[in-house]
Image (tube, coloured by chain):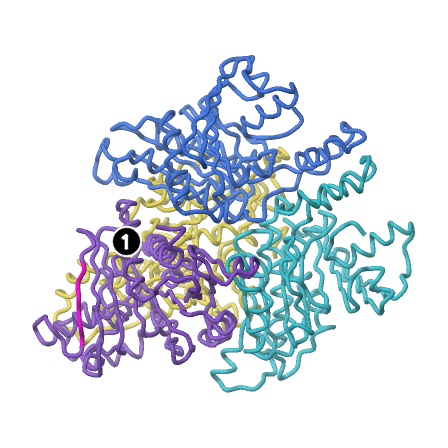
Chain colours: A yellow, B purple, C cyan, D blue
Amino acid sequence: MKYRTDLAIENVEMYDEERGQTGDIDGVQMEKVEYDEAIKATRIKVLDARGEAILQKPAGNYITIEVDGLIDGEEELKARASKALAEELKQLIHFHYYLKVLVIGLGNDKVTPDSLGPYTVSKVRVTRHWFIIYESEGDEEQACVSGFIPGVMGSTGMETADLIKKAADLVNPEIVLVVDSLAARNIGRISTTIQINDTGISPGAGMGNHRTMLNEQTLGHRVISVGVPTVIDSSTLIIDALEGYIKNPVEVENYIEQNGQDMIVTSTDIDQVIKDFSDIIANGINITLHPGIYS
Amino acid sequence: MKYRTDLAIENVEMYDEERGQTGDIDGVQMEKVEYDEAIKATRIKVLDARGEAILQKPAGNYITIEVDGLIDGEEELKARASKALAEELKQLIHFHYYLKVLVIGLGNDKVTPDSLGPYTVSKVRVTRHWFIIYESEGDEEQACVSGFIPGVMGSTGMETADLIKKAADLVNPEIVLVVDSLAARNIGRISTTIQINDTGISPGAGMGNHRTMLNEQTLGHRVISVGVPTVIDSSTLIIDALEGYIKNPVEVENYIEQNGQDMIVTSTDIDQVIKDFSDIIANGINITLHPGIYS
Amino acid sequence: MKYRTDLAIENVEMYDEERGQTGDIDGVQMEKVEYDEAIKATRIKVLDARGEAILQKPAGNYITIEVDGLIDGEEELKARASKALAEELKQLIHFHYYLKVLVIGLGNDKVTPDSLGPYTVSKVRVTRHWFIIYESEGDEEQACVSGFIPGVMGSTGMETADLIKKAADLVNPEIVLVVDSLAARNIGRISTTIQINDTGISPGAGMGNHRTMLNEQTLGHRVISVGVPTVIDSSTLIIDALEGYIKNPVEVENYIEQNGQDMIVTSTDIDQVIKDFSDIIANGINITLHPGIYS
Amino acid sequence: MKYRTDLAIENVEMYDEERGQTGDIDGVQMEKVEYDEAIKATRIKVLDARGEAILQKPAGNYITIEVDGLIDGEEELKARASKALAEELKQLIHFHYYLKVLVIGLGNDKVTPDSLGPYTVSKVRVTRHWFIIYESEGDEEQACVSGFIPGVMGSTGMETADLIKKAADLVNPEIVLVVDSLAARNIGRISTTIQINDTGISPGAGMGNHRTMLNEQTLGHRVISVGVPTVIDSSTLIIDALEGYIKNPVEVENYIEQNGQDMIVTSTDIDQVIKDFSDIIANGINITLHPGIYS
């Protein structure tokens, strides 16, 4: 597949385009859920090597939540989206008395389309210090949550995955919950889509950087990630726009590969996207991790 | 010309590409100045209707300052760039005892590539309140400077030009000095180029919005603007990348016009660009307006 | 009264302390409303010159909303506080088809305890540009709202009241709704209290600056203000702390007056206070002005 | 001594007040340096247990740099202050080919008077990733510098010292260079004073929190810290203001201890202080660590 996307649902779409039909995919299980007229979820499970080869994603769960008409829409729709997100997260994170979670906000808070992670984590309820102060081992209403915003390698000089591993060693969480900006093929995804997955994430992927993967193998803790597409990469933009108009597609791909590396393509209302989706995701996480306090 | 750029020097480059040669242009006067091995200025003067037709810019002065190797380079280079900018600004703004200037920072401080104006103005020395408190009519060392960050229409509900006109009426300045993000054709311009001009500016142009023009006709005050390219528009990106590969250029242009409107294309190090260039421009303005204090 | 406070309810408390009793006050009408166990409102109406002399506030309405246990408490309490605020605001602002409001965020977004106004306004739904684009004169679901963050005199060089008057002239609103930080006597008020009033406000009062008053006389439009105490002034702190321990109170007051001017006294969790109360107030305003969209 | 201050020079002043004279102090060595008419340094060396008992500071170096007239003053004075700071830092940090430094920004970037550390570190040139990419062991022009902004315990749930120890383990630096906000007795210190010391620092001390100490014992790396007073604590304010007016000082101290804990007292121009001093300190650090690039 010639497009770069972090969304499994777009890999499905592209596979369907290629084969000219929709329907069952070998080694992939799909289920659709309709929360209401505006909110839908698609649960994609990559089961085995056949599914991995077709969708080019490691085996595991990929849940996409799609919300229509969010930007500048009804405030109450944001609350419904948070609840739907929490419902889906609960499939992967089960609250219990001793639950301990480290929430990571990847990305650069100084570059708007890369700031989703830091903004979201700053709105998540962090509680671990209270467990320490009150010498408490668990709680019926809320999990023991810590938060970490590691920054980007250009500002820290350190590999982000290394820093996160160190923070995870300190906290020893059951789950590392990572929030990041993603890249999509279709610009329409930017203000409508959230993806949850349990197969790990590569910091900076949305920004075109390919860093050490964060997953259970590298961190030694289970990794759940939540992301929102905030950019499309420039090669995707160009190829997608010009399908059918181009004389020599291969040559074009080479050209783009050499020239498009240092660009970000994003939406003009990206500030509003970051504001709305960081609210939705932080609330969804708070409902999931602190069921006695948020609902 | 099929490319959208705010830089007169790129219009010259495109005209030269079209006609297949460089050199004199009818109705345009050009002069190059070399400050040092890293800093160059090109002074373009559009003299008359012939120049206006060729370069598609209103008659007036367009000064481009090009700085090599600024990002992550020597700190001292930024100081030299500020001084070069001040030298060029002084050609258009003459300090005197009664000089009164309103400095405007256009753009949206919440979207990184659109935040140059607000960041720059927050670093300019504002003095008007001291002139009022001390009941002073003028000063030998510094101008009477006010600063205004009008925000964007999506946040204020007001036409930016209307708000600026109101602020200008309040202050009654000799010069309205506007700082804004610009659009360029060539992404390499993003971390190297500053443009000064005295023909007015259209708020939001860099972001693809076309608002009421700010110039002497609309404001009733002389307008000098200083800008840095921080985005290239997506049509420019696509057309420029694919020159020669496209079957039907006109059809492509139509396609892009319909689909590319809501995108921003910028550089991955845009946070550093904004930080460095807001420092350089604020210092250049401070040197020009407050010669007794900055140098 | 020796304490400086912007809260009418604290003037009532101080008057009660002085006279050694509570109960009816000449020229003042008071009513208490209990929204639920955590949220109470006190509606103080200064009726005439007797009430003005006693409470040292101009005649008009002063509504105090008190919320217990907000910081780090249940998220849902914030939603209830927004609704209570909207109920009280509706007593002073009646939604109708042609309602036009200019919302002003006073203060300095770069100084945390002074940033309530700017943060709140950035979360209010601004709609005026849509009315213009669609050439609409009114709407059944939402008011025509514009937003303005004028900055502080040290950054603009302009008197804040003058700038606001210019913006109000541009928009011609039925109501100018001003959000600002206030000063209280009692530090416990900082994370619990919201005051609404309809008698005007003085920009910068919370920060110890006394600027031109914003009210119907100076602006030519009705002014409603919403504020939260975020600072106590240092003289208040000292006098309040040391009641009874001081040898010569008058001398102390003189001392403080000369030395305490340039200080801010605030709470260590002021960042959380600004975050929570800007959410509550913005939502309360959105519910009041856009009843068809928020609820 | 009844006042809480992080500045050794204020401990000297208080000791001199108590004993009614100035001059030599047992176990303490002092030296004054005058850089120019506006910039002075005082080098205090606590030599032994006698000095530790008198000044209530661990043995080591405490260098105070005092700058007159910085706020709203000449830009060039800031450059001179950076150079003086670099001169003093060089006494404790010797640049060499293999120098490796981890720069830490303590504090909360969302509370203005506590944001000095994060702002400063964001302006320091970080280079470690380039050493890794180019597989370089050292450099003649610049040190191998990493940067880390650990956040505050209320946002991370983690003890700040623990997080820093983890980051230091990752980088293995010769020196951990910590930048933090400090508390002073005298509010006049807020816009004039920088302190360097080599005896460690307690995160959050300036904000009234007492956390695990950062020093060579706890981190296993040499610690140099640079701080600027940005707050005075409320007890200091009250006691200092009322010296001589109070009937029963001990009772007052008890009262304050119980009531003054959650307050911050700072200066009204704290935003400008943070902006100016983060520039000065970042430049001073850049000159010290990257002598081939900054000067």
- Which SS type dominates the magenta stretch? strand
Identify the magenta region.
Answer: B28-33
Question: In the depicted view, which residue is nearer to us: B93 or A104?
Answer: B93
- Using a 10 Å C-alpha cutoff, classify the residue at mark 1 as few (fewer than 14 neighbours), some (14 to 19) or many (20 or more): many
Residue C94 percent location from the top left of the image? 70, 77
For residue B49, side relative to residue A110 (left or right): left
Q: Residue at x 73, y 68 (%)?
A: C199
User: Where is residue A55, by image quadrant?
Assistant: bottom left
Quarter containing the N terminus of chain B: bottom left
Residue D109 percent location from the top left of the image? 50, 46
Instruction: Please indicate, yes or no, whether residue A220 appears anywhere in the rendered image.
Output: no
- Decide: is D187 above or below B259: above
For residue B240, side relative to residue D70 (left or right): left
Task: Name the residue beneath numbered marker 1.
Answer: B81
* The magenta stretch spans residue C247: no
Seen as rendered, the residue at the extreme left is B21
Amino acid type, mark 1: Ala
For residue A190, side relative to residue C228 (left or right): left
Question: In the depicted view, which residue is nearer to us: A28 or C171?
Answer: C171
